[in-house]
Amino acid sequence: MAVAVPPAVVPAGDLTAVCPAPPRLLASAAGEADPEFGPASATARTTVSAMVLSDLGATLTGSGFLPVGGGAPLALIEDFAPEVSLGSSGPASSSEDGLTNRLAGVSRGVRVDAPSVFRAQPQGGLVPVAAATSTYTATDGDLRGLAATGCQVPSSDFWLLGASTTAGQSAILTLTNPTGTAATVTLELYGQDGPIEAAGTRGQLVAPGETRQIVLAALAANQERVAVRVRSDGGRISGVVQQSALRGLTPGGVELLSPAVAAGTTQVVPGVVVQDAATARSIREQEGYGAAAPELQVLVPGSSDAVLGITVYGRDGEVALPGGGVVTAAAGSVTAIPLDALAEGNYTVAVTSDVSVVASARVVRGTDDGKPVDLAGAPAAARLGNDSAMALAEGVDTSLVLGAPSGRSEVTLTPVAADGALGEPVVIGIAGGTSVTVPSSSLGRSPAAVLVDATGDPAYGAQVMVLPGARAGISVASIPAGVTAPQSIAVELGY
């Protein structure tokens, strides 16, 4: 006989987000799995920035940046409270004078030379609204360009697309374990011709507080497109792929490829940037630059081929693809769909399939033939909801690309100033089947972060960053889903 009891509420833990190791130039031979690194460049600079929202009583929770392996804080937004003092009562609904006065704590431009962790303590029994971003820039050297990514909540299962291990390409998988439990990692590799079997993909140990880096060319050599599934037992981990290219003596870009959403029959990729046709053509027509073109990559991880329906949404609605957008993708492989026929603009790409797939897009930006180009990866994103947030990268021009594939959506963007003050919310109406581009400068003067709330039909978003002026740097980061809601576990008593 079973007795029903109320679900047990799980106390909120700290929000932990890992900011990856700064890009480093590979110095060891490509055939070795464990890399050695040289300096990236004389101007290489990596910074981390973060924002945490207060409760309605203007009280901030303990938060700041810490070294992954422990030690003194790198930067604090608010002092951490002792664990024993963290209660589970609800967050304050007003300040002592009875007024609601929400604000934010902000930390910007913290210089780092190693992986770090952004940590924010729970607030009134809930995970706080918070976000952190890591930004790398370099104006010289082989790793010239821009690479930015949202700092990542650790997971036990995630997908990374967009890697390449052909001549001139470097792909380094970086795994970080911020927990106190050792993680045993299994890798599944897929290429353009099917699954890749390699020694060293099982039983990789990542100790607590450790970062492990693996040269993908040692596991999957000479692959134009590589997808990686990362699974861990024990501690949860974060992961990115440092992807870079060198064409002769000309830098071909650098990016930190971040995880896409879990495999499913629908994937939505916002933030697909296509530059003007004349510049793009002059770049890719150079010898060795055939891969310097935008494309959608779709992995079919199962044993059955997939029939894909690919729809591209621009500012004025759906945009036709050559061939009508229906593609058959082989099981166990990564299929590429060229996007270079699209006109200049920012797009959202939706993929539907009869079997589960994972999707991401490659974006390229250049200025002229013979000049360095940069690359970016735009992963499939989660649906926007309430309590999402983005910390905006410093020193770059940022736009938000928002798409609503199936119906009308409203997205409310609230800018956060560097001093923590919340600006006037801006409501963006997105017609079904369109994409909208919102420059961060239109939300206020140099916002440090943006709060995001979406209602209506599903909407998706990405932060597109470019280096100011006539420079090639570009990077894309998806807007993460909010994680503030309390969790509960169903309990059943039986005898």
Image (cartoon, rainbow, N blue to C red):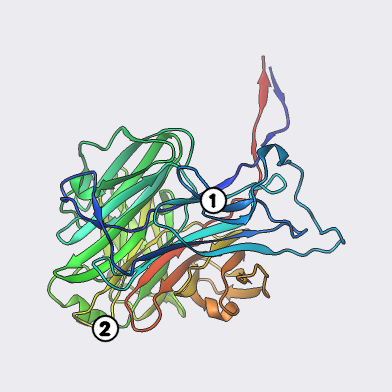
- The correct choice, above or below, for 317 with respect to 243 in the image is below
Residue 459 in sight from this viewpoint: no
**Few, some or many C-alpha atoms within 10 Å of disc 1 (few <14, some 14-19, many ≥20)?**
some
Task: In this rendered view, identify the residue nearer to me: 170 or 186.
Answer: 170
Q: What element does badge 2 sit on?
A: helix
Residue at the front extreme, as displayed: 72
- The correct choice, above or below, for 168 with respect to 415 in the image is above
Residue at the right extreme, as displayed: 97
Report the residue at 21% width, 67% height from top. Answer: 291
Q: Amino acid at mark 2?
A: Thr
- Quadrant that contains the N terminus: top right
- Quadrant that contains the C terminus: top right
Q: What element does badge 1 sit on?
A: loop
Task: From the top left corner, tell me how far across and down residue 348 is, in percent.
Answer: 43, 69
Please give the residue where the numbered disc 2 appears in the rendered image: 279
Residue 86 sits in which quadrant? top right
- Side of 154 where 79 appears, left or right: right
Question: On residue 73, which mark appears?
Answer: 1
Q: Which is more N-terminal, label 1 or label 2?
A: 1
Residue at the top extreme, as displayed: 495
Task: From the top left corner, tell me how far across and down residue 442 is, in percent.
Answer: 56, 81
Q: Amino acid at mark 1?
A: Pro
- Side of 473 where 408 appears, left or right: right
Task: From the top left corner, tell me how far across and down residue 480 is, in percent.
Answer: 52, 57
Report the residue at 72% width, 47% height from top. Answer: 124
**Few, some or many C-alpha atoms within 10 Å of disc 2 (few <14, some 14-19, many ≥20)?**
some
